[in-house]
């Protein structure tokens, strides 16, 4: 039986922190960081985490298609919850139903590629399609190398029966307790070992081993590879590896260091998605994942690639960035400096689990109601229809607002209410097919601002942090619809 | 068809504490201050009050729940005390309860008292608080200024009025209220300001600047009401009676149905239409002598002039800039300084507005007294947000007018 990638997508947060701003902030302490100061690193907004990025990447991958999924595997080492299934939150946000096997795959930088291998193996066994979503928002010590080289991003791949857009030729995994870095329980930051050792004993020995194994299994010659995805930030390693393995130099994929940064456990899939976007029928793609061993997957692109495009893809998201030169904002969003947030920030954000569970479709999936008698779409879904000429009782069917076109009716930029990134933007967002909601608006470019009539869309974000209890609320916020705005 | 409230109930006496930052007074002291004045004004004894309505909105910050705080502060003689809350329109609700009780014949003399102690939160503006277990999970992270600020963006888009003109009209409103407040010894803010200072003030929520926003205050206000017959039997003449008491509460249409454009108050239109009918007023722009509106923000006052059918739709900016609503204009608005300068102790505000009308009708408003013999006074007390709110419109006036 053949299996393959049926669709794919990606997500990169809009903010791109100028690396020069990091390097110059630290120049007094470690002038050597200037050598890593080129380009930008993707930076999650204060209301983004691995779950929100996984959800957005999955939406990018699935588009408007309705798929009978068998499972969702989430790969990340920065899961927002240690004990509340993160993949389950992704499933609820996407409203994919409950007959799913959801799994969090974590604990290594190859969690994303391992999740993909596991999904392939399960589908191979005759199961329904599996969505693999990987995302990473790593925290890094100020003035560390990984602060300079990493970035926040996500990617998603749908694996199913049939060749799809890229047929799986084979996969191989090795397990080797090689500790290039680690992050112990209750530790915020990574502890890293010497780069030269990581390169010579780690990358140079473990990666070829896994790659050669998969090439041998699939009976493919290395020089036939058209795209080699090696998701590490360290310079020239991919080139040395390619040379060592006889992979053509032109097959080496850009590790996106200049535009995004290395997105940890998600980066293998980010690079795979990016490679698929640039691929043609017949191309052979080798994607690797490194971390206490190595994953290697081999795909061959089919002619179906000409009929599929993600909504934005990694390529699209690379173009949608907004240059951020204020390193202090990064420090604040990553809780690396103690900001005076004011008394208004002290409000208790406890969430009633009963409330959330009862209203999960409304809060987590943006489901409202459509009156079966007059057709009026409304949010929230209510017992009595809001149409003053109808008023039908208990007559509403579920209506999902995610993906619906909307425009802005009124708005403000509020500097009084507490926001981690003032001003707080919010306004009345009205959907073209009916329904409206007074809601928070995120990712507003301050120099453009908002205006009445501006096209808007929904995006899955963090609504509030309950810092006292370690909980976070999610919700679908509005954001300017850049595509409809002509960007 | 009900005949309405007109001329069935009269105000026997009123009182109002000084509003402001009353750092050294508890809510109970403020209640007593307002009540002492009202009792003296009414000329009755405390034991003649048969029932009381007590309004306070953010009770968790000061007195706590129920009617007890009023009964205990004034040592009321075990009479019924009902605590009411309807957002910032709570004060008008207390008044409505007392007036209805008298009109129904259930009691002869009733008390309405409102209080709020807002300067114990540690910061300016209204306290940050939960909106409810479900609402907290989907409502916008909105403050009061941010909610009302949106009126400006929608009003501007609807009427095609340049933002600078709206900003200027809003500034005129605030300057006018400061001028008026400077003549009011009980006002929280008594300083005069100029247009330039308003326009240069820091932004609170776009496009509202610091001077477009009312502050929050400590204060109390109260009314003692009875029937005109009883008032006369107590020796009162030239009675000030209640002409209309209307309340309109959003049902979610503005918030959830796409027929509302965000530029006006649905509730104010409904309540004022009904109030004019109840009071027998056909041309409010000509017949009303004075108005006190809920100027929580300058833009609220601006659009309310249209929702009360005094300025034509889209015409409020012109009327405001023409000085129509100034203390010397055709129809003064906020002659006491309004929420903006008299102050805004939530539970007391609706009663404070009526207090000013009552003084003006009797010629007792001192330096700020309107000299053209006011006959009808309208108060507009709003609570909530433009997209979901409660709006009270009360008209009082000279008996028989």
Image (spheres, helix red, strand yellow):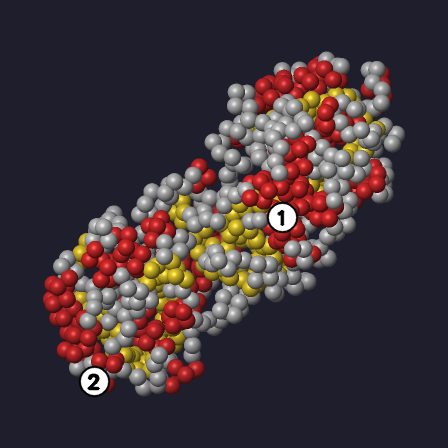
Q: Nearer the viewer, mark 2 or mark 1?
A: 1
Q: Is residue A360 left or right of residue B75?
A: left
Quarter of the image for residue B54 reads top right
Residue that badge 1 annotates: B167
Q: Are marks 2 and 1 on the same chain?
A: no
Q: Which x, y percent locates residue A457?
A: 52, 63
A1 or A117: nearer the eye?
Answer: A117
Name the element at disc 2. helix
Q: Please give the chain letter of the residue carrying mark 1.
A: B
Q: Is residue B72 left or right of residue B372?
A: left
Residue at x 71%, y 45% (from the top left corner): B321
Quarter of the image for residue A377 reads bottom right
Q: Which x, y percent locates residue A30?
A: 20, 53
Q: CA distance from mark 2 to mark 1?
A: 69 Å
Residue at x 34%, y 53% (from the top left corner): A327
B166 or A396: nearer the eye?
Answer: B166
Using the rendered image of the protein, determine whether residue A240 is visible from the camera's viewpoint: yes
Give the quarter of the figure containing the N terminus of chain A. Answer: bottom left
Residue that badge 2 annotates: A223
B216 or A438: nearer the eye?
Answer: B216
Name the element at disc 1. helix
Residue at x 27%, y 75% (from the top left corner): A253
Q: Which x, y percent locates residue A412?
A: 55, 51
Q: Is residue B124 above or below residue B255?
A: above
Q: Please give the chain letter of the residue carrying mark 2.
A: A
Residue at x 48%, y 56% (from the top left corner): A446
Binning the other alpha carbons within 10 Å of mark 1 as few (below 14), some (14 to 19) or many (20 upward) gives: many
Binning the other alpha carbons within 10 Å of mark 2 as few (below 14), some (14 to 19) or many (20 upward) gives: few
Using the rendered image of the protein, determine whether residue A73 is visible from the camera's viewpoint: no
């Amino acid at each position: 039986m053949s299996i393959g990638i049926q669709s794919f997508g990606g997500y990169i947060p809009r903010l791109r922190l100028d690396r020069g701003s990091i390097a110059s902030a630290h120049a007094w302490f470690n002038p050597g960081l200037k050598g890593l100061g080129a380009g930008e690193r993707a930076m999650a907004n204060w209301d983004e985490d691995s779950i929100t990025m996984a959800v957005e990447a999955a939406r990018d991958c699935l588009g408007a298609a309705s798929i009978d999924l068998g499972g969702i595997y989430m790969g990340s080492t920065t899961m927002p919850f240690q004990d509340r299934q993160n993949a389950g939150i992704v499933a609820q946000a996407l409203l994919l139903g409950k007959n799913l096997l959801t799994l969090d795959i974590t604990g290594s930088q190859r969690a994303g590629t391992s999740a993909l291998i596991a999904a392939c193996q399960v589908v191979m066994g005759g199961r329904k399609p599996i969505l693999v979503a990987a995302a990473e928002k790593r925290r890094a010590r100020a003035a560390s190398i990984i602060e300079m080289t990493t970035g926040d991003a996500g990617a998603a791949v749908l694996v199913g029966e049939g060749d799809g857009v890229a047929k799986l030729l084979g996969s191989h995994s090795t397990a080797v307790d090689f500790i290039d870095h680690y992050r112990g329980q209750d530790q915020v930051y990574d502890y890293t070992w010497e780069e030269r050792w990581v390169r010579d004993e780690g990358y140079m020995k473990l990666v070829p081993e896994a790659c050669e194994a998969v090439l041998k299994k699939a009976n493919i010659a290395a020089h036939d590879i058209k795209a080699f995805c090696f998701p590490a930030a360290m310079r020239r390693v991919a080139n040395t590896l390619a040379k060592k393995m006889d992979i053509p130099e032109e097959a080496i994929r850009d590790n996106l260091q200049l535009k995004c940064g290395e997105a940890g456990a998600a980066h293998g899939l980010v690079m795979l998605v990016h490679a698929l976007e640039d691929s043609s029928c017949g191309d052979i793609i080798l994607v690797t994942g490194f971390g206490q061993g190595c994953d290697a997957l081999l795909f061959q692109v089919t002619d179906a690639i000409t009929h599929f495009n993600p909504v934005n893809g990694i390529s699209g998201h690379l173009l949608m960035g907004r240059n951020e030169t204020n390193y202090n904002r990064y420090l604040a969003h990553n809780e690396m400096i103690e900001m005076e947030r004011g008394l208004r920030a002290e409000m208790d954000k406890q969430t009633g689990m009963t409330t959330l569970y009862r209203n999960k479709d409304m809060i987590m999936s943006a489901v409202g109601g459509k009156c079966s008698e007059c057709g009026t779409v409304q949010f929230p879904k209510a017992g009595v229809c809001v149409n003053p000429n109808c008023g039908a009782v208990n007559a509403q069917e579920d209506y999902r607002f995610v993906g619906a076109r909307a425009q802005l009716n009124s708005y403000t930029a509020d500097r009084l209410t507490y926001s981690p990134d003032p001003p707080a933007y919010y306004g009345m967002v009205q959907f073209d097919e009916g329904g409206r909601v007074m809601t928070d608006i995120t990712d507003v470019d301050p120099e453009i601002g908002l205006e009445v009539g501006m096209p808007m869309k929904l995006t899955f974000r963090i609504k509030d942090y309950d810092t006292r209890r370690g909980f976070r609320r999610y919700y679908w916020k509005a954001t300017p619809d850049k595509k409809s705005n002509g960007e | 068809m009900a005949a309405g409230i007109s001329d069935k109930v009269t105000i026997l006496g009123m009182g109002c504490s000084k509003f402001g930052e009353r750092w050294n007074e508890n809510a109970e002291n403020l209640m007593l201050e307002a009540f002492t004045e009202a009792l003296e004004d009414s000329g009755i004894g405390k034991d003649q009050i048969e029932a009381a309505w007590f309004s306070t909105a953010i009770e968790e910050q000061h007195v706590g729940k129920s009617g007890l705080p009023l009964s205990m502060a004034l040592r009321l003689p075990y009479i019924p005390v009902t605590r009411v809350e309807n957002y910032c329109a709570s004060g008008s609700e207390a008044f409505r309860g007392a007036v209805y009780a008298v009109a129904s014949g259930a009691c002869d003399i009733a008390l309405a008292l409102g209080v709020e102690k807002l300067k114990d939160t540690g910061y300016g503006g209204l306290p940050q608080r939960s909106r409810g277990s479900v609402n907290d999970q989907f409502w916008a992270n909105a403050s009061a200024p941010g909610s009302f600020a949106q009126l400006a963006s929608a009003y501007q888009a609807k009427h095609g009025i340049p933002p600078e003109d709206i900003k200027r009209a809003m500034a005129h409103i605030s300057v006018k209220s400061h001028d008026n407040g400077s003549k009011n010894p009980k006002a929280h803010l008594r300083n005069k300001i100029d247009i330039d200072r308003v326009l240069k003030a820091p932004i609170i929520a776009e496009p509202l600047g610091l001077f477009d926003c009312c502050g929050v205050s400590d204060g109390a206000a109260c009314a003692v009401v009875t029937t005109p017959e009883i008032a006369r039997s107590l020796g009162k003449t030239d009675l000030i009676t209640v002409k209309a008491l209307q309340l309109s509460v959003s049902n979610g249409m503005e918030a959830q149905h796409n027929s509302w454009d965000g530029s006006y108050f649905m509730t104010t239109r409904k309540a004022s239409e009904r109030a004019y009918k109840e009071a027998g007023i056909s041309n409010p722009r000509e017949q009303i002598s004075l108005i006190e509106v809920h100027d929580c923000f300058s833009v609220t006052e601006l659009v309310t002039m249209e929702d009360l059918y005094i300025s034509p739709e889209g015409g409020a900016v012109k009327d405001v800039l023409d000085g129509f609503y100034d203390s010397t204009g055709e129809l003064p608005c906020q002659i006491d300084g309004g929420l903006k300068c008299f102050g805004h102790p939530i539970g007391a505000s609706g009663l404070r507005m009526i207090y000013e009308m009552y003084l003006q009708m009797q010629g007792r408003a001192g330096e700020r007294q309107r000299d053209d013999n006011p006959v009808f006074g309208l108060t507009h007390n709003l609570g909530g947000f433009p997209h979901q709110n409660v709006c009270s419109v009360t008209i009082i006036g000279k008996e028989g007018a």
